Amino acid sequence: MNTLFSRIFLGLSIFLVILVSVWLFAPSGSGHYHLILTGVGKGRIHPYRAKFEPYRGKKMGGAAGIATVIKETVASFTGEPFNIVSIGSEISGTADAYFTRGSAVIAALNGIGIELMLIGNIEFTFGQDRLRELKKEADFVFLSSNVSESGTGQTPDFISPEVILYPGGGLRIGVVGFTPPSTPDLTSKGNVSGLEFALPGPDLKVRIEALRKAGVDLVVLLTLYDRSRISREEWVAVAQAHPDICVLLDYEIEEPPAIIRDGVVIKTVSGYNQSKEIDVLDLEISGRPAKILSFSGRRMAVNHAEIDPDPKMVQVVEAVTRKVQLQKKEKIADFAADYQREYSTECPIGNMIADAMRHETGSEIALQNSGGIQSDINSGEFTLGDLFNVLPFDNQVVTIDLSGSDLLELLTQSASRRRGILQVSGLTYSYANRSNDDYELKEVLIENESIIATRTYSVSTNSFLSDGGDNFLAFRNGRNLKYGRQQRDVVYDYLKMLSRQGEITLPATGRIRVEQ
């Protein structure tokens, strides 16, 4: 009898041990997990009127609006585990960002409650030393897995190469981040001096495998790659590293659905976001390590017609931008009409900026990248804050000597539209573009004469382009570089001069023609 009782007791004990072990070691939140994604805010911590569909004319975005949408979203999870992360491109792009050198944006992101931010090229706008200072102000991690110091190969001290997040329910989420390898071509050289930006490759796979050995349940890879333009080689390297989730950018009006490709769940954030939306990836998971059973993506508008801004965040933003608001209100000029920035066609704003540089330097020609023009111009009063929205980057005006053949190479690349076209002053050009791979420079005229390949021309541009930015590498062939004032100051003075005659009109003069 004692023997039978002992066996029963032993069996029950073993069963209880197994039951307790399952309870202790299986993640209690194995039903669902949610990843909240922000980013590409470009310094937009105040709400603003959207210029493009589907939100044209609506009051959108801002930190207080984002905070409300995130709080409402988190409440809908009913206790299920989640994380809030940013894919970067946050700390520059507005007067609020510029006058506080990024501090106002960091304070807003602290208030929103993000846990980490991928470092993108925008984060290097104020230079490495300032980024190191901003890290001390941040309550979250600066993340990048492919940035290293030249010579040592070490990750800079203000960046973490990977992070393990603990959202609850026993889950452990590993996150790695990939800063654009093209960053040295997307910011001024001095901002990234001494740093290297690796392409995705075996190192990424090793890093993700190490996270799995450390016991994470899921691995998330944050990137600023465009989903439609990531190269086959880059995607193969990502797929071979085998993260569970990869976050990319999209440039669509309608949100692309979350998909699975080569075993990797892909969710996108809009490259046009500027705080207008937040994205959520909802996962149904099971087991340890977690298995993704199903997934779906959501994109929620930060539309002030539908929400009440979070009052605490309103106070935070007002406190960190109070002094900035007075500076932003300085009137520069009045415009007679609305002018829209363009990426792939000639625009009056681009003409005006190029004219301002040429007026400043006396150069024969001026060239401006379309991507450097970040906002439209509305009719009526134009303020210093508006100027910072149009030209948020801290570029200097640079005068260089370029050969005619270099100019032909630059304008041929412009015809591809891969990085937007070059806006011009002092010359006209025509081109055909049937696709990004089927394009042709037709004609270039300087003072109504064909360009001479062997002649040297005086060219003014911004310091971003003179460094070969946006992959316009022929600028690097320039000689006799002369660095002048900040481009924004040059345009400020030019507009002040024009405004003496009253309202400013910016005619489209047909400097750039698109042919078949």
Image: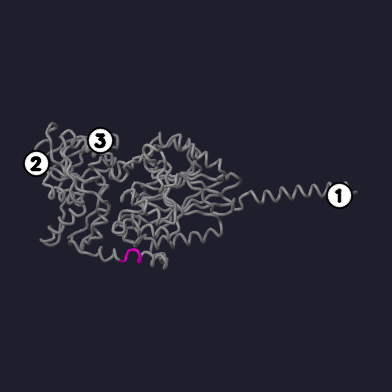
Q: Which of marks 1 and 2 is in front?
A: 1
The local crowd at label 1, few if under 14, some if 14 to 19, many if 20 or more residues have their Cα within 10 Å, is few
Q: Quadrant of residue 369?
A: top left
Q: Quadrant of the C terminus?
A: top left
Q: Taking 445 as reference, is 142 above or below it?
A: below
Q: Nearer the viewer, residue 327 or 42?
A: 327
Question: Can residue 516 be seen at all in this image of the molecule?
Answer: no
Task: Pick whichever, 423 or 169, lies toward us.
Answer: 169
Q: Residue furthest right?
A: 1
Numbered tag placed on residue 5 in the rendering:
1
Above-or-below relation of 398 to 71: above
Name the amino acid type tagged 1: Phe
Q: Residue at x 71, y 47 (%)?
A: 18
Label drawn at residue 439: 3
- Main secondary structure of the magenta stretch: helix
Which comes before the other along the chain, label 1 or label 3?
1
Q: What stretch is highlighted in magenta?
A: 318-322
Residue 515 as seen in the image, left or right of residue 145: left
Residue under label 2, please give it.
447
Whether the residues at callouts 1 and 2 have beta carbons within 8 Å, the answer is no
In the displayed structure image, the side of residue 431 where residue 212 appears, left or right: right
The image position of residue 223, as x and y in percent, is 41, 44
Does residue 376 sit above or below 147 in this rendering? below
Tag in front: 1 or 3:
1
Q: Distance between the residues labelled 1 and 2?
A: 106 Å
